[in-house]
Image: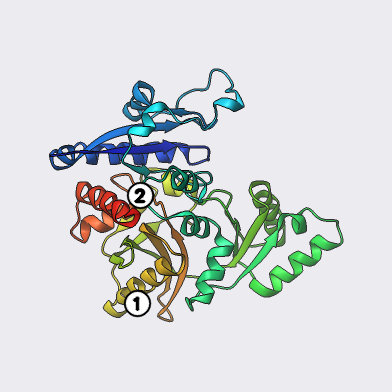
Amino acid sequence: MTTRSVGLLFGGCSGEHEVSIASARAIAQAFSTSSNQAAYTLLPFYIQKNGQWCDGAIAQQVLASGQPLSLDQPTAPSARWLLPPTASAVDVWFPVLHGPNGEDGTVQGLLKLMQVPFVGSGILGSAIGMDKLAMKMVFAQAGLPQVKYKAVSRSQVWSNPCVYPKLCDELEAALDYPCFVKPANLGSSVGISKVRTRAQLEAALDSAASYDRRLIVEAGVVAREVECAVLGNDQPEASIVGEITYQSDFYDYETKYTEGKAGLLIPARLPESIATQIQTMAIQAFTAIDAAGLARVDFFYVEATGKVFINEINTMPGFTATSMYPQLWAASGITFPALVDRLVQLALDRHA
C-alpha cells in the first residue's frame, strides 16, 4: 500500500505558539495509531517564533518535549520562511498554526503557491475567520443574529483629547455596560477585556489598540456559551453541541489554557430545538465565510429568552486531546485518529 507524506506544520509567529505545539503533539499521536501509520508518513515541520522553518531532528525534539526552541541567536532575514528541502516530499500539509501568521490566510497563501493540498480553509475563509469585524459583516449579510457591536480603529483611540471622550460617549450610549473590548485579529481571547466603567473602557481600548489597529466593542449578554464543530467541504456536517463552563468573570486566555479553570459539558443540556438551531447556524456560518475542512463555531444561548446569537467561528481550533473540537466529534462517533484521517482526505478531495 502506498503511503502519503503528511507535513505537520506547527509553532509559528504568533502569541499562540505554545498552543500550536500542544495541538501538534496530539495530532502526531493520532497519526501514530496502526491504521494511520499504514496510510501516512508524518513529516514534522516546526516554525520558530522568528519565522525560521526547522525539520528533522529539531522538529521532532520540539514535538517530543512540548517546549518551544530557545532562540540563542537572532536569525538573519534571509533565513526566515526558507523551506527545508524535505518540504518537497510532502504530499499534503496539515498546518496546525493558531493566530496571526498561521490561520489568517498568510500560510494558506504560501501553501496555495506551492500547489499542494492542505488541511483547512483557504485564503478567504481563513482571513475572514480571523478578522472579527469582517466575520461579523459576513454573518450579518448571511442573516445570522449577533449581539450589538461597534467597530473602532486605533486612530480613534489614540486620537486627540477632544475626539476620544466623544468616542467613549458613543460606545456607552450604544452598548452600555458591561461590554467587551477585543482586538479584531487575535485569537484565544488575547487582548480581550470585560469592562463595567468608563475608566475600564478607556484602559481596555488602549490595551486592545496596542495589539491591533482594528478593534471591536460588543455588548455584554447574560448567556450560556455553547460550541458546535463542523467537518466537511461543500457538504459540511455539524457535531453535537457542547458547552463551556467556568467560574471566572469571562472565558479569558488564562481560563482557557489553565487546567481546571474551565470545563466542557458534552453534550450540552439544551432543548432539542435549540441544539438543532445551533447546528444549522454553525453550517450557515461555515458556508458564509467559505470555510473548508474544519471549524468550531461559538454561540451565546440566552436561556431567559430562548434566543441564540452567533459569537465567532474558528477555522483552526485547538486540537489537543482535551480541546472542544476533537471531543465534540468523539462524542458524535468519530475518534481522534479517524478525525485526522478524515481531514487529510477532505484536503485531498478539495485540491482535486
Q: Quick one: SS at disc 2?
A: loop
Q: Which of 251 and 280 is in front in this view?
A: 280
Q: Image quadrant for the N terminus?
A: top left
- Indicate the position of residue 223 as horizontal and vertical percent values: 45, 70
Q: In screen coordinates, is 235 left or right of 156? A: left
Residue 277: image tag: 1
Q: In which quarter of the image is residue 332?
A: bottom left
Q: Nearer the viewer, residue 125 or 162?
A: 125
The residue at which mark 2 appears reads as 119
Q: Is residue 235 above or below residue 2?
A: below
Residue 256 visible in the snapshot: yes
Q: Image quadrant for the C terminus?
A: bottom left
Q: Quick one: SS at disc 1?
A: helix
Q: Nearer the viewer, residue 323 or 340?
A: 340
Q: In screen coordinates, is 85 left or right of 137? A: left
- Indicate the position of residue 91 as horizontal and vertical percent values: 31, 40
User: What residue lies at 66% left-to-right and 54% top-to-bottom?
Assistant: 204
- Indicate the position of residue 263 as horizontal and vertical percent values: 34, 54
- Indicate the position of residue 218 as horizontal and vertical percent values: 59, 66
Q: In which quarter of the image is residue 232?
A: bottom left
User: What residue lies at 35% left-to-right and 49% top-to-bottom?
Assistant: 119
